[in-house]
Amino acid sequence: MGLDIGGGIIGLIVLALDVWAIINVIGSSVSLVAKILWILAILVLPIIGLIAWLIAGPRKGVVTA
């Protein structure tokens, strides 16, 4: 029974992080096509898509020359 509760909590955490990532994708400055692809990646592969967004997603406040 404890494992079921722990799995549910982990699932809720992943869901919350995915919603946060999708909100960040929508608010980012990438093109519409890139936004759609990022959102699809996060929805189809929730954990992998989230990690990919955290690593490769656009950064706020970073100036590139």
Image (cartoon, rainbow, N blue to C red):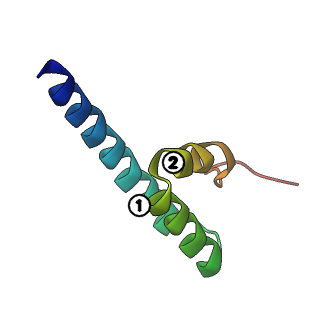
Which image quadrant for residue 51?
top right
- In the displayed structure image, the side of residue 44 where residue 35 appears, left or right: right
- Mark 2 packing: few (<14 Cα in 10 Å), some, or many (20+)? many
- Residue drawn at x 68%, y 49% is 56
**Total numbered badges shown on the rendered structure:** 2
Marks 1 and 2, how far apart at CA: 12 Å
Is 27 placed left or right of 57 in the picture? left
Q: Amino acid at mark 2?
A: Leu
Relative to 33, 64 lies left or right: right
From the viewer's perspective, is residue 54 above or below residue 44? above
Residue at image x 41%, y 61%? 23
User: In the drawing, does residue 45 fall left or right of residue 59?
Assistant: left
Say which amino acid is labelled 1.
Ile
Q: Is residue 3 above or below residue 52?
A: above
Seen as rendered, the residue at the extreme left is 1
x, y percent for residue 44: 48, 61
Pointer 1 or 2: first along the chain: 1
**x, y (%) of residue 26?**
47, 68
Q: Secondary structure at mark 1?
A: helix
Q: Which residue is mark 1?
A: 23
The numbered dot on residue 44 is none
Q: Which numbered tag is attached to residue 50?
A: 2
Viewer-proximal residue, 43 or 21? 43
Q: Residues within 10 Å of mark 1 (few under 14, many from 20)?
A: few
What's the residue at 61%, 68% (across, down)? 29
Residue at the limit of the structure toward the top, as seen here? 2
Dot in front, 1 or 2: 2
